[in-house]
Amino acid sequence: MAFDATFWATVALVLFLALIAYLKVPGMVTKSLDDRADRIRGELDEARRLREEAQQLLAEYQRKRAEAEKEAGDILAAAEREATMLRQDAKTKADEYVARRTTMAEQKIAQAEREAVNAVRSSAVDIAVEAARRVLAEQGATAPNAFQSSLAEVRTKLN
């Protein structure tokens, strides 16, 4: 019998398959594929876990941002209230200052009026005394007591 190339190719193929089966190559390939699938599954689980953590962190940061915005709004409202109170306080103090200054000016004006009236009265008394002295001097020394009594009478009426 003559062995042709097809026979030897078939024998080589059977030997190759036997060698592969003896070395447990299909098991190694299966194990390698299973290991790779497990590794991919683990990476997917890790990615899912990391995604959930990222979503939790995002939710927490959004909550913190909302709280910070609320706190900033509260601070702004408090600052506006304080500014309003300071404005009102400043206005009140300015009004009180103006009222005090007005009262002081009115008091000074009243005092100046009193002093002017007293000065006019004093001048009037001096003029009246001088006029009475001249009248009495013209009339002579006939009534020395009349001058003194008239002078006293004028002083009591003017003061």
Image (cartoon, rainbow, N blue to C red):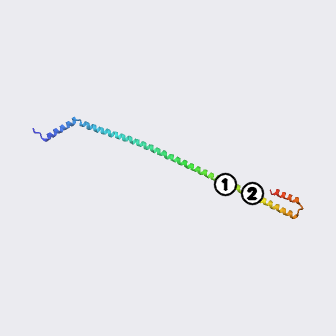
Give residue 22's quadrant in the image.
Answer: top left
Q: Amino acid at mark 2?
A: Glu
Give residue 156's quadrant in the image.
Answer: bottom right
**Residue lying at 26% horizontally and 37% vertically, measured from the top left:** 28
In this rendering, the answer to whether 34 lies above or below 130 is above
Q: Is residue 70 left or right of residue 21?
A: right
In this rendering, the answer to whether 155 lies above or below 28 is below
* Residue 97 position within the rendered picture, expressed as x and y whole percent measured from the top left: 65, 53
Q: CA distance from mark 2 to mark 1?
A: 21 Å
Q: Which residue is mark 2?
A: 115
Mark number for residue 149? none
Report the number of numbered marks. 2
Point out the residue furthest to the right here.
Answer: 142
Mark number for residue 101? 1
The quarter of the image holding the N terminus is top left
Q: Is residue 95 left or right of residue 41?
A: right
The answer to whether the residues at label 2 and label 1 have Cβ atoms under 8 Å apart is no
Point out the residue furthest to the top here.
Answer: 22
Q: Residues within 10 Å of mark 1 (few under 14, many from 20)?
A: few
Label whose residue precedes the other's in the sequence (2 or 1): 1
Give residue 40's quadrant in the image.
Answer: top left
Point out the residue furthest to the left here.
Answer: 1
The quarter of the image holding the C terminus is bottom right
Q: Residues within 10 Å of mark 2 (few under 14, many from 20)?
A: few
- Element at label 1: helix
**Residue lying at 51% horizontally and 46% vertically, measured from the top left:** 71
